[in-house]
Image (cartoon, helix red, strand yellow):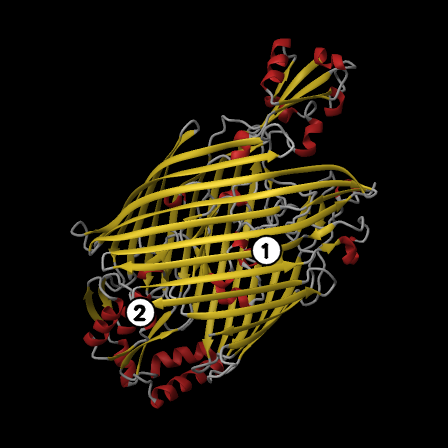
Amino acid sequence: MRVTQRAIQAMGDEMRVVRNGFFVGVCAYALIGATSAMAQADQVRNFNLPAQSLTEALRAIARQSGLEFSAPADPLRGKTSKPLRGQFSPAQAAKQLLKGSTLTAEVIDGALIISVGRVSTATNTLGNGGDIIVTGSRLSSEESPSPTIKLDADTIKVAGQADVGEAMRSLPQNFSGGQNPGVMSGTTGSGNGNVSSGSSPNLRGLGGDATLTLMNGHRLSYGARVQAVDVSTIPLAAVDHVDIVADGASAIYGSDAVGGVVNVVLKRNFDGATLVARLGAATSGGDVQQQYSAVIGKTWQTGGVLAAVSHDYNSAIYSHDRSFTQYMPRGTTLYPEIKQTNAIISGHQSIGSVADLSIDATYSRRTSFQQEELVYGDIYQNSPETESYSISPSLKIKIKPDWHFSLGGTYGRSDTKFDQIGLYEGTQTSRIRGCYCNELANIEGFVSGRIPGIIANHIGIVLGGGYRYNHYTSTRYSASRADSAGSVESYYAFSELSLPFVEPGQGGLLLHSLSANAAVRYERYPGIANVAVPKFGVVYGVSPSIDIKTSWGKSFKAPLLNDLRAATYAQLYTADTFGGERFPAGSTMLIESGGNADLKPEKATSWSASIAVHPEWIKGFNLQVSYFNVQYKDRVVQPVAGTAVYQALSNPDYEQYMTYDPSQMLVDQTIANADLFYNYTTPDGLNNVVAILNNRYVNAAKQKIDGIDLTVDYRIDIDTQSAILLNANGAWLWSKQKLTSESTALDMAGIIFNPPRFKARGSIGWTDGNFTSMLYVNHISSLKDTRSTTVAKISSQTTFDGSIRYELPAPAGPFHGVSALLSVQNIFNQRPPYAAPTSGYLDYVNYDSTNFSAIGRFISLTLSKDW
C-alpha cells in the first residue's frame, strides 16, 4: 500500500518541529499530536502469536489491529519469526519481530508499513537460512547481556576505510598494537610486531590472541606465530556488518574469548552485482593505494549464493618520506608495501521444509615488503608471503517446530612464508627462509529448542559439543629441524539456557521485560589441562526505552603453540653482564629459555554492567554506557624479558627464577635438556657457573583491566529522505599488570606501546539518500614513556577525517547505481606525537607506532557501480 500524501505531509510537519528545536518539539508532539491515526498506532493490544513465517506474523499483527499491511517481499522471504506474547502497540509488536534487521515498522495513515531502513544497534541480524544470528549467544531469540557494538559495512566504506582491519584500528575499544601493519621494530609488549602485514583485532589491548575472531560464527585459522586471526583477508565487498562483543565469552565460544569476540557477518540474500575501484595516496609521499573489488549474488525462493573478490595494493612509506623521521637511515620502511588478493564464496539452500545447508569458503594471498636500515650500514629486508584458505559448511535440521539440530565445522590453513635477507654495502650477508604454518580443523554439533511449562514463557536451551585441532609449525628451511612444532587438541561440551521471565509487553510499571541467560562450557586439552567456565547474564527492561544489562563469567585462553613447543636454548654468559659484579672474576651465568610444555591455560574472571537508552519518543536515538572489569591471571610471560635481563643478578624481584651455586650435575642436565646450546664465554666457563636463570615461558603474570565505554547514535530525520547523523564512541581504560607473583603492579594503560587511558571517535553528517557528507574526529589521550629512569610525556593527538559521497539518482540507464566517494583522513596532516628513540638509537622511530600512524593526510576517491 502506498503512503498517502496526507501522511507524508504530517510527517513533514513533525520533522520541521524537530528541526526548530527537537527536544521541545518532541515534548509538544507527545502532548498535542494525537490525531486519529496516531491513536490507532498507539493502541495497545494483547498478542499471542506462535513461531511462524515472518510475513504471516506481521500480517497477523496488522489484522488484529485493524490495519492494512504493506511490506517488501524479498527481505521477508524465507524468514521465520520467534513467538510473540504480551501487550504491545502494533508498531512495537512488529519491531519485536524485526529486531536487529534492516527493516523498520511504522503505522502511517491506517496501515502497518514495513520498509528497509538502517541496521539497528541491537545484537541480532537476519542471516543465513532465515535464522536470526546473535553474536554472544547460540540462542536465536536471546539478546546478549554483554555490551555489543556493531560496525555496518556501508558505514566503514563511507568513512573511507579500505578493510575491516582499518575499521577495527579506529574503534576506541580496540588497540592498534599486536599484529598490524605499521607496527615498527623497537616496540615492547607481548605480541607487538608486524610479522605478516596482516590485521588482527586486539580488544582492550589484551592481545590479538585474547580476542576471538569469527566469520559467520565460525572460527578461522590462526595467522603467523601468534594465535590471532587476520581480518584483512575477508573482502569488505562481501561483508554486511561486524559485531563486537567487548566482554569475556569463553562459556559460549571457548578459548581466546577473554577480551571479547569479533564476528564478521557476510551478506546474505544479495541479489545483483557491484564493481568498486578505489585510488588513494598520502599527500606527504608513499602509501599509494589501489583497490578493485567485485561482488555478485543471486537469490531464489529457497536460497542464494554470493561471490566476491578484491585486489589491494599499497606502496611503502620510507623514513625519508616524512620530515620527522629523516634522521633515520634512508631505507627504513615506516609502513610496508602490501599486495593482496582476497576471494570468498558463500551460499545457502533450503532442503525442503526441514533443513538448511550453508557454506562459506575463503582464499587469500598477500605479499609484502619491509626494510630496516641500521646506522652502521647493515640492511635487513623481510618479504613475507601469506596464503590462507578456509571452508566452513553447516547444516541445520528442523526436528520439530521449536527444535533444531545444527552441525558445522571449519577446515583452514594459513601459511606465512618469511624471507629475511641481510645486506651490507650491496652484498648479501645472510638469508633466513622459513614458514609459520597454521592448520585448523573444527567440528561441532548442538541441539536447540524451547521448553514450555516450567515458567510462564518458553525456556530456550542449547546442548552441544565438538572437537578442535590446531597445528603450528615454525621452521627455517635451512635448519635440520623445525624451530617449534606441535598441535593442540580439545574436546568440549557446552550448554546455554535462556529464561524469559517477562517478555516485552507482559510486565507493568518499571518492568517491561526480564530475562536471564546462563551458559557453561567444559574443554579437555589432553596433556595440558581441563577447563570449565560458566557465564550468567540478566537483561532487565525497565521500560520500552531503557534496558539494564549485567553479566558475569569466566574465560580462558589456551597457551600459544609457539610458547608450548618452541625450541629451548641454554646460553652461557659472563656473570658481570647481568649485574653479577659481586661474584669473582670469571664467573658465568647459564640462561635457560624457550618453550615450556607444562604451560596451563590463562584464566580470567570478568563482569560488566550497562544501561541502554533508546526512547520511543526520540526516534533514532540510542545511548549505551557500560562498565567492565577483567581479572586476568596465569598469563604466560618470559619471567625476565627484554633489557630487564641485564638486572637478573642484581634485582631481588627475579630471585624466584634464579638457582644460585648450582651443582655441576644440574648444569650438565640443563644443557642436555636444551635443543640448542651457545657458549659466549671461555671454554672453561662451564666450570664457573654461579647461577642458572630459568627464563622459559611460565604462567606468572596477573593483570587487572577495567573501564567505561560510552556510545551514542542519533539519526534526526528532517523529512522522508534527509537526516542528520550523529555518533560518538569513547572508551576509558585502566590496566595494571604484575609480571611475576613477587613483582610490583605496573601501569599498562596510558604507557607507551600499550592502549591509551582514553580513546574516542565521533562523527556528524547529513544525508538525503543520494548525497552524504560526514566529518569525523579522533582522539587519543597522552601516554607516558617509561623506558628510561626519567618518565617523559607523549602528547595526545586529535585528528579529523571527512568524506563526501554522491549517488546518481535512480532513473534507469547506464549510470544507474553509480556513486562516487571522496575521503580525506587526517585532514590537517598531523604527525605522530614525539617519543624519543630508545637510548637515542637512530634505528628506532620517534613515535609510538602501536598507537599512532606515520601515514598522515590520506586522500582517496572511490567509484562504484551497482546492477
Q: Which residue is mark 1?
A: 340
- Tell me residue 115's x, y (percent): 36, 75
Q: Residue at x 31, y 49 (%)?
A: 517
Going by the numbered disc 1, the residue's amino acid type is Gln
Earlier-in-chain disc, 2 versus 1 = 2
Instruction: Please tell me whether mark 2 or mark 1 is closer to you in this view.
Output: 1
Instruction: Look at the picture and state if 242 lies above or below 73.
Output: above
Image point (64%, 18%), residue name: 692
- Please say if 42 is above or below 123: below
Q: Name the residue nearer the viewer: 401 or 640.
A: 401
Circles 2, 1 touching at the beta carbon (< 8 Å): no
Out of 566 and 389, give the one closest to the viewer. Answer: 389
Tell whether 231 sits left or right of 80: right
- Estimate the x, y position of residue 550 in percent, counting from the top left: 38, 51
Q: Secondary structure at mark 2?
A: helix
Task: Using the image as rendered, state which of residue 189 and residue 710 is in the foreground.
Answer: 189
Secondary structure under tag 1 reads strand
Amino acid type indicated by mark 2: Leu
Q: CA distance from mark 2 to mark 1?
A: 36 Å
Left or right, 614 with respect to 222, comes to left
Residue 776 sits in quarter: bottom right
Q: How many marks?
A: 2
For image coordinates 54% across by 40% down, the residue present is: 437
- Residue picked out by circle 2: 76
Q: What residue do we see at 75% from left, 54% from top?
A: 318
| Neighbours of disc 2 within 10 Å: few (<14), some (14-19), many (20+) | some
Q: Is residue 220 left or right of residue 650?
A: left
